[in-house]
Amino acid sequence: MRLNIGAGSTRREGFLSVDVRADAKPDIVSDAWGLETIDDASVDEIYTRHMLEHLDPNDARRTLARWFQALRSGGALNIVVPDLEFHCRQLLGSSFSTFADQQAHAFAGFFGWRDESRGGNREDAHRWGYTERTMTALLSEFGYWQIARQLSGIDCEPWHLNMTAIKP
């Protein structure tokens, strides 16, 4: 079983979609740390794209612990979040993205695209942020192994922190 957690209305081939919002019509309606219908050690892969930063730090920790339980031994975790280190450099003018407004993109990395004119809403607020160092430390704390930043492929632009890890 492969899960796309925080999927919203986006579908990923070969993955069950999980989202807290029933109106997104996911396969499973659940908050990220619940997954009550998922047995422990039954999941081959968990993918999440730009969801973890929307959780308070304590909820993010609960979530990573629950995902560790849900993954089978050898199961893979792929987390994509904004790279706060990149956005700090971007705000200071030493790193650039493909977005027209560098300052707006930097602030969106910190706080989320919160207003409707930019395609977001107030619920899109970011509640925490991560760097490669902090994400590596956090995943290690919960027992994940082979933690690595992905530097090529989808979502590997420098403003994305694309991390993978394995449950031993």
Image (spheres, grey):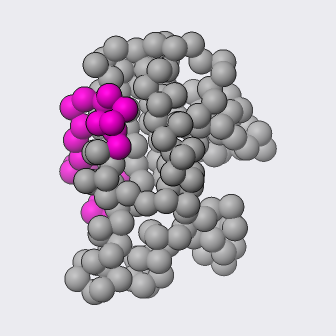
Query: In the current view of this chain or complex, which residue is farthest to the right?
Result: 23
Q: Is residue 65 above or below residue 108?
A: above
Residue 150 appears in the figure: no
From what the image shows, is residue 132 above or below residue 30? below
* Residue under the point 63% across and 71% down: 114
Q: Residue at x 43, y 25 (%)?
A: 68
Residue 102 higher or lower than 25, as above or below: below
Residues drawn in magenta: 138-160
Quadrant of the frame with the C terminus: top left
Q: Position of residue 78 (x, y in %)?
A: 37, 38
Horizontally, is 83 left or right of 17 in the view? left
Q: Residue 14 colored magenta?
A: no
How far across and down, in percent of the image, does residue 41 sit?
Answer: 46, 13
Work out whether residue 166 or residue 14 is closer to the camera in this orientation and state it.
Answer: 166
Numbered-mark total: 0
* Residue 40 visible in this rendered orientation of the protein: yes
Residue found at x 65% / y 37%: 31
User: Which residue corresponds to the image point at 32% horizontal and 28% vertical from the top-left?
Assistant: 143
In the image, is residue 139 part of the stretch drawn in magenta? yes
User: Is residue 158 or residue 84 the one in the foreground?
Assistant: 84
Percent position (x, y) of residue 133? 25, 53
